Amino acid sequence: SGWGKRNNINEARYNAEKSYKKNVDLNSEIILSEIDGEKKKNIEIIEKLKELNIRKQNSEKLIEIFRSKEKVSCASLANYLDISERTANRLLLKLEENNLAVSDLVKINRGRPKIFFRFF
């Protein structure tokens, strides 16, 4: 008996497999539940962020932005993550290259157009 719960997806998967094997060995009943679409998408995003070597603290904050579906500028992301604008710009470009964000160029009254990013 048991279930696949833990601090991160890899530990949860390990515990789920361990629980499944124990139940099969004991010839016990097994109940499997499906992950809903939103949780599955969050897990996929977390895995991609790990692959991109984005720190856990920043990953959690990025997930919040993904959920809010807000458009963010480089400056607002830098402020939110407490990083430099240059680092935020690199991060946004990395997310865009890996199909986690898309940029929109928005004209403003004065100066250069502003780039906003939307997350999927």
Image (cartoon, rainbow, N blue to C red):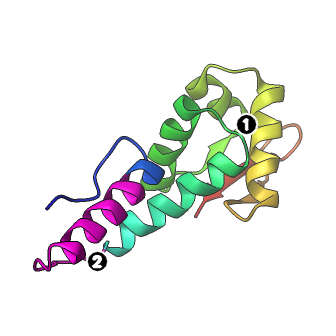
> Residue 34's mark?
2
Query: Bounds of the magenta span?
Result: 12-34
Answer with left or right where residue 79 lies relative to residue 74: left
62 up-or-down from 56: above or below: below
Q: Amino acid at mark 1?
A: Cys
Magenta span: chief secondary structure: helix
Q: Observer-nearest residue: 103 or 27?
A: 27
Residue sitting at x 41%, y 48%? 11
Residue sitting at x 29%, y 58%? 4
Disc 1 target residue: 74
> Residue 29's mark?
none
Q: Position of residue 96 (x, y in %)?
A: 77, 57
87 up-or-down from 68: above or below: above
Labels 2 and 1 touching (C-beta < 8 A): no
42 up-or-down from 60: above or below: below
Q: Observer-nearest residue: 101 or 22?
A: 22
Q: Position of residue 100 (x, y in %)?
A: 67, 60
Residue 27 quadrant: bottom left
Q: Amino acid at mark 2?
A: Glu
Q: Position of residue 103 (x, y in %)?
A: 75, 58
Q: Observer-nearest residue: 30 or 97?
A: 30
Answer with left or right where residue 58 lies relative to residue 103: left
Residue sitting at x 84%, y 47%? 113
- Residue 104 inside the magenta-drawn segment: no
Q: CA distance from mark 2 to mark 1?
A: 37 Å
Q: Quadrant of the C terminus?
A: bottom right
